Amino acid sequence: MSTAQRIGIYPHEFASIRASVLVPLIDQIDRRSGKADGLLALHGLLRSQLDDPYAMVPMNRYIAIFEDAARIVEEPTLGARLGTLFKPSDIGPIGVLFSISGTIRSGFERLAKYVNTVQSCTNSGVFEEDGNLVWSYRLDDPRLWPRRQDSEFTVAASCQLVRSCFARAWRPVEVHFEHVAPRDSSSLQRIFRAPLRFGESANRIVMSGTDATRIYRQEQPDLAAVLERHIAEVSGWTPTPETAAEKVRALVAIYLGHKPITLPDLAFDLKISARTLQRRLSEEGTSLRNIVRDYRRSILALRMQDRSVKMKRLAQILGYADETALWRARKHWDPS
């Protein structure tokens, strides 16, 4: 059975990201074209806003700037390449916490736990499947699209964290992206050094369970505790009791199209009984069926904008056996 060990659930309705994340991108545009200030102004930002490492900017502007930047410098894999230059210090104490982790697994669990102190409205989690460890990342708002650059940057940066903090020759088992395959993926292949899959329900890094649990160093619990306290104090973030529906929705976002989603499995992941989970969802006016349906509808609405995606592939992404099952579900969603 797959087990979700750590889930990052968005605590804010308004999607935002640390302004400092834009600094390497703006530096690249300055060097390549000198159009950085104009690009920032086009999206309602000033360079001075990037000076405060803890300032936040709207996620939609960040995503749009990243996509525009790739076009300006005429480099489709800009995000992935910038990810290979990523250092633990680029995300402050979270990166340092990752770097002192004893295993790759614990590093990703911490990354998932604190992702929302760097950017909100993000679903991130770690789970086991078929002897592998899977780290999943997805921006929760379907309106933030296209977002290829952010996806490739985040996954490449995460791989770089592993290579710089644990093993330089490390390779994932597979890498998944939610966007469709580019015309030429050879550059991405060289960066990730692993089989690539596109059009998935989330961005994922699949890694060997043996690699993920190998002990690379002895952890320093006192130092980790100091860093975690600092993260909470600086960000104003504290673990809050999410509703059952929020917890289930976060798991659905991680698992959809990748493994079966059943009430007993989700209850196991959340360490409660299936009956208790069903009761709590009912008390909150929803059910697992409604949550999965609504999430599938949001992804379908997004993917239908891309006419190159076949219905058979959409069915796989949404976790249906085939396109007939998807067609029947859609008729049930919209009986008219």
Image: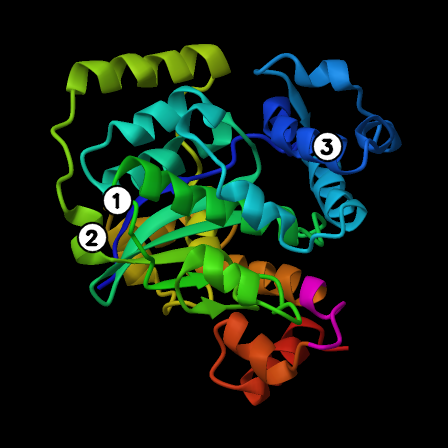
Hey, which quadrant is residue 247 in on the image? top left
Where disc 1 sits, the SS reads loop
Magenta-colored stretch includes residue 172: no
Residue placed most toward the observer, 107 or 32: 32
Hey, which quadrant is residue 331 in on the image? bottom right
Residue behind mark 2: 211
Residue behind mark 3: 31
Q: Could you tell me if residue 254 is visible in this image?
A: yes
Task: Name the residue rendered at 15%, 26% in the picture.
Answer: 219
Magenta-colored stretch includes residue 306: yes
Residue placed furthest toward the bottom? 324
Residue placed most toward the observer, 212 or 253: 212
User: What's the magenta region?
Assistant: 302-308
Eye-nearest disc, 1 or 3: 3
Find residue 258 and report its horizontal and vertical position in percent.
41, 67
Tag 1: residue type?
Ala
Q: Could you tell me if residue 282 is visible in this image?
A: no
Name the N-terminal-most of marks 1 and 3: 3
Residue behind mark 1: 167
